[in-house]
Amino acid sequence: MSGCGSAGTWERLRAFLKRFAAYGVLGWCGEIVWTALRGKLTGRQPGWELHGTTSLWMFPIYGLIAPLYEPAHDALRQCPLLARGLAYTTGFFAVEYCSGWLLRRVVGIAPWDYSGETPWHVHGLIRLDYAPVWFVVGLALEPVHDRLMTKKT
């Protein structure tokens, strides 16, 4: 491939796009399970249909784990578990807030609005009471990231 980048560059891009897609799909699935279980446990959903929801906008937002979370995980590997979890929580809150803010500006609405759900929201874009969830999700993603990096493309 002369004049268009090296074969190694294209392989790295291909591997990155696969990880971006994997995180996007994983995020979609996790959100569907989360919303279904939350609906059942809060009594919003009677019966056992367990309907979960997500938005198409969430795929690229979850895909951002590849360029944002992976370098953070690599940099934090030697840090204590508490420090890593707090860093991940802060990062997830920042991405959730910024992406929701941007979607509100560009398309007029964010796929989520926590305003009427809890007093622990910030502008309806993040829920501070979800900090433990993001803490656990961040730590749970560590082996996922490691596996995706060792998997052959």
Image (tube, rainbow, N blue to C red):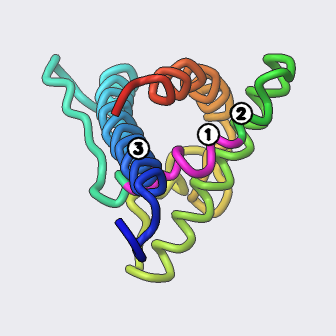
- Left/right of residue 104 with respect to residue 127 in the rendered view: left
- Left/right of residue 83 with respect to residue 65 in the rendered view: right
Q: Main secondary structure of the magenta part?
A: helix
Residue 148 placement (x, y as % from top left) = 45, 28
Tell me the residue that label 3 is attached to.
Answer: 15
Tell me the residue that label 1 is attached to.
Answer: 70
Labels 1 and 3: the sequence-earlier one:
3
Depth check: 43 or 37 in front? 37
Can residue 14 be spotted in the picture? yes
Callout 2 amino acid:
Asp
Mark 3 residue element: helix
Tell me the residue that label 2 is attached to.
Answer: 74
For the point 27% across and 57% down, which residue is it? Answer: 56
Q: Quadrant of the C terminus?
A: top left
- Left/right of residue 131 with respect to residue 40 in the rendered view: right
For the point 16% across and 19% down, which residue is it? Answer: 47
- Whether the magenta-drawn stretch holds residue 41 is answered as no
Magenta residues? 60-71
Depth check: 111 or 114 in front? 111
Labels 2 and 3: the sequence-earlier one:
3
Callout 3 amino acid:
Ala
Q: Are marks 1 and 3 in contact (CB under 8 Å)?
A: no
For the point 61% across and 32% down, which residue is it? Answer: 134
